[in-house]
Image (tube, helix red, strand yellow):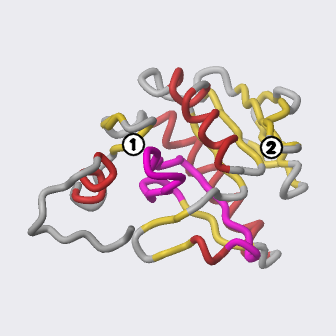
């Protein structure tokens, strides 16, 4: 899936997606292409705060790799997302390739934007669940409310809503923002 022959016209939307210039803020969601502008400064502030804490914690404990958007996460032939933050455990490091992540990260954090809120809470959540993401968090930068979901027997189970923090069951750690 990583090599594209630019002499042959693309046959699928995934091939079109892979031909976009590096750094393009776009996602393939249920075989529809969605493009978005740069996030707000409040959105970015939450990402930087959480990502830096998760990165330092996971590096210190040698647990795996943490990535921030834009990084392409290819979940299947109809879904390629750019989660705000994702963590891949050492056990799953084989899904990390030069041009993106091919498979379900262990942890995904999406910080809500007005244009992406519905997708993050419905379609993307469903795809993350089906792909096997072990823990999924959505964070509202306006209210500072976070809602987590933990994968149990193939289905997301809601975790307690939190204010100003993300309480990761997977990492057994609290991250404040």
Nearer-the-camera pick, 105 or 60: 105
| 73 shown above or below 95 | above
Can you tell which quarter of the image residue 162 is in? top right
Q: Residue 48 or 6: which is nearer the viewer?
A: 6
Quadrant into which the C terminus falls: top right
| Secondary structure beneath label 2 | loop
Q: Residue at x 72, y 58 (%)?
A: 106
Q: Is residue 86 above or below residue 83?
A: below
Disc 2 packing (10 Å; few <14; some 14–19; many ≥20): few
Front-most of 11 and 101? 11
**Where's the N terminus, which quadrant?**
bottom left
Q: Is 76 within the magenta?
A: yes
Q: Which residue corresponds to mark 2?
A: 154
Query: What is the tally of numbered marks visible in this picture?
Result: 2
Task: Please give the residue where the numbered disc 1 appears in the rendered image.
Answer: 28
Distance from disc 1 to disc 2, alpha carbons, whole Å, reads 23 Å
Q: Quadrant of residue 32?
A: top left
Q: Is residue 132 magenta?
A: no
Q: Is residue 92 left or right of residue 30?
A: right
Image coords of residue 51 (percent x, y): 62, 55
Residue at point 84%, 58% (across, down): 171
Residue 91 percent location from the top left of the image: 76, 75
Q: Which residues are magenta?
A: 68-92
How crowded pointer 1 is (Cα within 10 Å; few <14, some 14-19, many 20+) is rated as many
Which of label 1 and label 2 is nearer to you? 2
Residue drawn at the location 82% of the way across and 26% of the way down: 161
């Amino acid at each position: 899936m990583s090599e594209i022959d630019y002499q042959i016209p693309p046959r699928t939307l995934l091939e079109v997606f892979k031909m976009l210039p590096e750094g393009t803020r776009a996602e393939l969601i249920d075989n529809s292409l969605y493009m978005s502008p740069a996030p707000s400064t409040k959105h970015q502030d939450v990402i930087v705060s959480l990502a830096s804490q998760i990165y330092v914690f996971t590096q210190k404990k040698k647990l795996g790799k943490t990535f921030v958007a834009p990084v392409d996460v290819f979940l299947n032939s109809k879904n390629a997302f750019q989660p705000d933050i994702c963590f891949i455990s050492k056990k799953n490091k084989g899904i990390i390739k030069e041009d993106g992540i091919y498979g379900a990260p262990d942890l995904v954090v999406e910080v809500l934007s007005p244009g992406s809120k519905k997708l993050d809470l419905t379609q993307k959540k469903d795809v993350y669940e089906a792909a096997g993401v072990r823990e999924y968090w959505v964070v509202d930068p306006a209210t500072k409310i976070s809602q987590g979901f933990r994968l149990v027997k193939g289905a997301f189970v809601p975790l307690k809503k939190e204010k100003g923090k993300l309480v990761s069951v997977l990492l057994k750690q609290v991250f404040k923002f």
